[in-house]
Amino acid sequence: MARVLIIGAGGVGQVVAHKCSQVPEVFSDICLASRTLEKCEKIARQIPRPIETARVDADNVPELVSLIQQFKPALIINVALPYQDLTIMDACLETGVDYLDTANYEPQDEARFCYKWQWDYHERFKDRGIMALLGSGFDPGVTNVFCAWAKKKHFDEIHEIDIIDCNAGDHGHPFATNFNPEINIREVSARGKYYEDGEWKETTPLSVSKIFDFPEGIGERKIYLMYHEELESLVKHIPGVKRARFWMTFSDNYLKHLEVLENVGMTRIDPVIYNGQEIIPLQFLKTLLPDPASLGPVTRGRTCIGCLINGIKDGKKKIYYIYNICDHQKCYEEVKSQAVSYTTGVPAMIGAMLMLTGRWRGKGVFNMEEFDPGPFMEKLNLHGLPWTEIDR
Ligand SMILES: NC(=O)c1ccc[n+]([C@@H]2O[C@H](COP(=O)([O-])OP(=O)(O)OC[C@H]3O[C@@H](n4cnc5c(N)ncnc54)[C@H](OP(=O)(O)O)[C@@H]3O)[C@@H](O)[C@H]2O)c1
């Protein structure tokens, strides 16, 4: 029985609040806090058991500390934006509370995400006797656990990892992003990067693509090479990996809009003066695009995210594929959100559950693949994200 503070009342925060409320034997008391109180209250009204709500500016450490001292959580689930990771970790250090997130820190004025900033907290978390679990979403998150599972159960040596993320859903809008538009567009328009033979290699954004045949009727789709944060931790924690890449599907329509927006400067993150006032074009664009939380009722189709891994087992070469398929409409029926928020929010709840029940414990800052994947894999099947594995 534990008290949990969820920070961030967007698409993912909504799913985390629903899923935690479904497990009262672990999450006895829940507080959902965010910048806009009304969004927390709207989510609280959807949930059958009472949860608390609060307004907090998570960029402000004293405000966070005062909320933590008032609510007294055992754990904070950070599903605000990557910009808030360090301030929330600072507040955890000050109050001695455990921490979990789904995306690594990124400075607001520079589109550059990496684990270094958060890994640098390891000694301080260890000395304080508290734990941080980083990247407990789907990718990063479940994809890291899939790799740890493959290493534990299926391989003596892992040589190549390809993480492949397909959203085969359609929301009917000419252009919309499935999670926070600012974070999504920063990620997609960044240079591609992958790991090969001991070094990182860069590619022009979205310049490398190929066709992948997805299972269970989803069929062939074009996948594009991108950089994604779990590559950094997997290369560190899975010894012997020779190549690690991340791929994502995009519709031609999405890419066409993105190209035009980039060409006219709407994806810029540096300030420009408009009518005597400073604005950031990408933040302005975000205010015009559909709120990802509003896509739930209109999104149809499925997501398929998985890992294609090759290496050696019992002296023989082996190719192994493990994936989850998630249906947008089924997610909406259960928690009033589409599958991209669902596939992030469920693993956040499972990571929190494993920490609070002592099955994943440690002092310091950890990535998902550092723990035994068994309990997490078991919970995925029980809480809405069943997985399938294929020896190819
Ligand atoms: N690992 C994965 O698989 C994965 C996949 C998708 C997303 N993610 C991550 O999940 C997180 C949430 O994504 P989302 O789609 O739910 O985004 P979202 O819909 O934009 O929600 C973000 C929420 O954070 C709140 N917030 C922003 N700044 C804040 C601040 N300073 N103080 C307090 N609250 C603040 C926002 O408040 P307002 O409503 O007032 O703006 C909003 O409620 C992001 O970090 C994203 O990168 C991870």
Image (cartoon, rainbow, N blue to C red):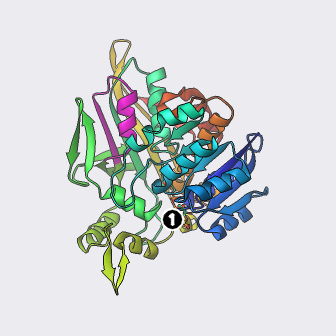
Q: Is mark 1 within 8 Å of ligand 1?
A: yes
Magenta span has 260?
Answer: no
Residue 368 x/y as whole percent:
50, 35
Local packing at callout 1 (Cα closer than 10 Å; few below 14, some 14-19, many 20+) is many
Q: Residue at x 67, y 56 (%)?
A: 67
Expressed as whole percent of the image width and height from the top left, the position of residue 92 reads 59, 45
For this view, does 269 lie left or right of residue 301?
A: left
Give the x, y percent position of residue 152.
48, 21
Residue 214 seen in the figure: no
Picture residue at 32% right of the left edge, 47% below the top? 227
Left or right: 159 in relation to 66: left
Q: Report helix, strand or loop for mark 1.
A: helix
Quarter the N terminus occupies: top right
Give the percent coordinates (x, y) of residue 56: 61, 62
Residue visible at 57% across and 62% down in the picture: 57
| Amino acid type shown at disc 1 | Pro
Q: Quadrant of the C terminus?
A: top left
Q: Which residues are magenta?
A: 227-247
What residue is shown with label 1? 292
